[in-house]
């Protein structure tokens, strides 16, 4: 026997001692790669496998995979059997190392990393969500390079937090096993073992992160409150899954399988050849599809205004993750479909945002007059629209990127079946210089709101209350704009001046409609008769004038005390304005004519109020409740 034959026989003996099938393997079967103790036997086994490969007996069938070798000779049959035993043993060892030596993945700690969260202050234009492209651009030129061209280690983006899934010595053992199996043509089997162990582990990690297995139908049937909470959890889970779980799997696969020929005739195709990315893709693809499937379900779900801001959050989170998704998935032929899907979902989320904003505009347009709000107070629609507009400005960085066209004429007048449609043609969208398309949409929303409020104001039978309603609502709009620098910056000073002017007109019309008739009662015209003025006062006309004033003021007091001006400052300013017109006029009228009444019978029937009484009574106005009785001082006595 020559030296080579002797070495081959020795190698076969070492391998055959570990023939699990013939030994009747059980739970207590010793393993070569146990992570501790004497490694000499493991090293001896690996050397024997190397010798089997190096000392293969000459045979035409020896070209290619050993599993297809001819057994035409005893030596080749023995060699082939030893290789089969060696591969079966290495497969068991590979599975054992993956299963028994895995480190506990601290999912909770990963999910809580502040570095993985988007800045919650949306007014900060430098938040990580706003600048995903810049973050990627700061990296070196290898950002877009494939992992296959990285010779020593898997490079991470700074946002990625790779976790050691196995100790370094276990990774070294797995690499040693995988390299022998791949060299013998068993790379695919090795990859399948990896996927069979790590796919359930990846799935379990996502479950611990709170990622539920929901179909598109399941997601779309959820009530919005429940769905909103799930979106918040998904954003947190997606960051941890992509930047922690998937990135760590990718790095582990790279360390174990890079540069190894793991393909086989059963899986390799011209369009998708198996590479070292194949085990990674098989381990994570299902979990990734499940993860991004939730965002996909949201992107194609029913569009309604309340969903806008959570969908923007979802869009921003996905945009923030895309550079990492690209780095982890796009370089792999077998996993790049995950990246493609994520890009498509982000595009659909952007479409959903644009569609929801348009739907919101139409909803404001279509809101029917129905019944007037009691007391002419601020309409719920006004509060809702202005709060919504303020939130739009909080999200202006993203929305300015997504909203790229102004409201079109056709969109502005697309009110088919809308009872407001005949008057919509008179509406104009103010043209402001260098105005962003998003700003045009906000201005248009307020224009439509004003138009709708005018229709609601017409529901009041009392013209004064109609004006008060418009005054309240336009005042609220103006102050919401002033309270939000972003909103003010969007609509601009010119349009704000127009709104302020509209408020002034409404306030002036209210006072004229409410108080002109009352103040006319305090004029001299119609009280004198022919002759000298001082001696020609018609007492009967004067009595009627006092009676008319008393009745008109009492009616105004009774009615307008029940009207509502919810803004404290505006309410006080209105009372002061009324008092500044009413009290001096009454004081003057009373001073000139009271003695004519007091010299007659029953003066208390005509002079019912002192100036102080009126001043107290004016304090009851606009409280939204019936007036309280006052002990009025009688001026005649």
Image (cartoon, grey):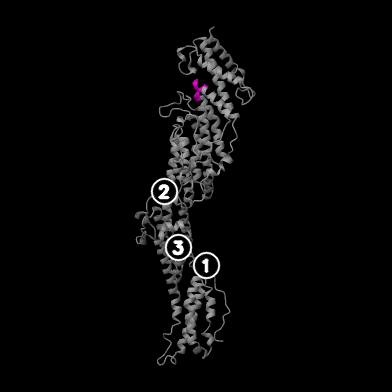
The residue indicated by pointer 1 is 568
Q: Nearer the viewer, residue 441 or 289?
A: 441
Q: Marks 2 and 1: in contact by CB < 8 Å?
A: no
Residue 410: give x, y in percent of width and height.
35, 54
Residue 594 is one of the magenta-drawn residues:
no
Lower position in the chain sequence, tag 1 or tag 2: 2
Q: Main secondary structure of the magenta part?
A: helix
The x and y percentages for residue 615 are 53, 77
Residue 463 visible: no
In this orientation, which residue lies closer to the viewer: 235 or 110? 110
Count neighbours of disc 3 (C-alpha within 10 A) and say few if under 14, some if 14 to 19, many if 20 or more: some
For marks 2 and 3, the one nearer the N-term is 2
> Please, what secondary structure does the residue beneath circle 2 have?
helix
Q: Position of residue 376 (x, y in %)?
A: 48, 67
* Quadrant holding the N terminus: top right
Tell me, yes or no, whether the highlighted magenta stretch contains residue 184.
Answer: yes
**Which residues fall within the magenta stretch?**
180-188
Mark 3 falls on what kind of element?
helix
Label 1 Cα crowd, 10 Å radius (few <14 / some 14-19 / many 20+): few
- Residues at marks 1 and 3, CA–CA distance in whole angstroms: 15 Å
Mark 2 surroundings: few (<14), some (14-19) or many (≥20) residues within 10 A? few
* Residue matched to label 2: 401
Please determine whether, in this image, residue 135 is positioned above or below residue 439.
Answer: above
What residue does disc 3 label?
478
Pick whichever of labels 1 and 3 is earlier in the sequence: 3
Depth order, front residue of 455/48: 48
Q: Nearer the viewer, residue 184 or 4?
A: 4
In what element is the residue under mark 1? helix
């Amino acid at each position: 026997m020559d030296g080579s034959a002797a070495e081959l026989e020795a190698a076969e003996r070492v391998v055959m001692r570990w023939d699990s099938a013939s030994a009747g393997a059980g739970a207590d079967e010793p393993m070569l790669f146990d992570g501790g103790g004497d490694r000499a036997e493991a090293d001896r086994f690996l050397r024997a496998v190397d010798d089997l490969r190096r000392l293969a007996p000459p045979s035409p069938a020896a070209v290619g995979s050993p599993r297809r070798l001819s057994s035409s000779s005893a030596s080749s049959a023995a060699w082939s059997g030893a290789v089969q035993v060696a591969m079966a043993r290495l497969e068991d060892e590979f599975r054992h190392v993956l299963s028994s030596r895995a480190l506990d993945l601290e999912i909770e700690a990963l999910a809580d990393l502040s570095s993985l969260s988007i800045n919650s202050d949306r007014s900060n234009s430098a938040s990580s969500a706003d600048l995903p492209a810049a973050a990627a651009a700061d990296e070196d030129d290898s950002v877009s390079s494939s992992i296959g061209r990285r010779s020593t280690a898997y490079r991470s983006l700074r946002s990625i937090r790779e976790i050691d899934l196995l100790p370094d010595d276990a990774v070294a053992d797995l690499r040693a096993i995988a390299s022998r199996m791949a060299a013998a043509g068993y790379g695919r089997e090795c990859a399948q073992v990896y996927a069979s162990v790590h796919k359930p582990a990846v799935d379990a990690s996502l479950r611990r992160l709170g990622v539920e297995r929901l179909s598109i139908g399941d997601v779309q049937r959820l009530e919005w409150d429940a769905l909103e909470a799930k979106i918040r959890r998904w954003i947190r889970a997606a960051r941890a899954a992509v930047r922690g779980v998937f990135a760590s799997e990718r790095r582990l696969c790279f360390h174990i399988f890079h540069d190894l020929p793991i393909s086989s005739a059963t899986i390799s195709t011209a369009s998708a050849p198996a590479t070292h990315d194949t085990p990674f893709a098989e381990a994570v693809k299902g979990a990734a599809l499940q993860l991004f499937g939730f965002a996909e379900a949201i992107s194609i779900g029913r569009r309604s205004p309340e969903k806008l801001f959570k969908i923007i959050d979802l869009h921003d989170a996905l945009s923030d993750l895309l550079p990492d998704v690209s780095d982890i998935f796009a370089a792999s032929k077998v996993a790049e479909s995950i990246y493609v899907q994520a890009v498509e979902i982000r595009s659909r989320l952007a479409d959903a945002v644009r569609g929801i904003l348009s739907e919101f505009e139409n909803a404001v347009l279509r809101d029917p007059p129905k019944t007037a709000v009691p007391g002419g107070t601020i309409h719920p629609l006004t509060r809702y629209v202005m709060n919504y507009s303020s939130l739009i400005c909080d999200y202006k960085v993203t929305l300015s990127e997504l909203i790229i066209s102004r409201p079109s004429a056709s969109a502005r007048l697309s009110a088919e079946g809308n009872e407001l449609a005949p008057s919509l043609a008179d509406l104009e969208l103010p043209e402001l210089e260098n105005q962003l398309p998003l700003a045009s949409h906000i201005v248009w929303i307020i224009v439509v709101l004003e138009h709708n409020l005018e229709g609601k104001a017409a529901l009041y039978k009392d013209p004064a209350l109609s004006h008060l309603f418009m005054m309240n609502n336009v005042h609220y709009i103006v102050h919401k704009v002033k309270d939000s620098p972003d909103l003010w910056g969007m609509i601009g000073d010119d349009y704000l001046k127009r709104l302020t002017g509209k408020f002034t007109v409404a306030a002036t019309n209210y006072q004229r409609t409410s108080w002109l008739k009352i103040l006319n009662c305090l004029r001299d015209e119609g009280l004198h008769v022919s002759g000298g003025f001082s001696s020609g006062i018609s007492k009967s006309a004067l009595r009627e004038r006092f009676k008319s004033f008393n009745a008109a003021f009492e009616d105004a007091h009774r009615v307008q005390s029940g009207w509502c001006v919810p803004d404290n400052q505006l309410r006080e300013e209105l009372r002061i304005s009324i008092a500044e017109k009413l009290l001096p006029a009454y004081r003057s009228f009373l001073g000139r004519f009271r003695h004519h009444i007091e010299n007659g019978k029953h003066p208390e029937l005509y002079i019912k109020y002192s100036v102080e009484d009126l001043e107290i009574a004016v304090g009851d106005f606009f409280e939204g409740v019936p007036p309280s009785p006052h002990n009025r001082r009688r001026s005649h006595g």
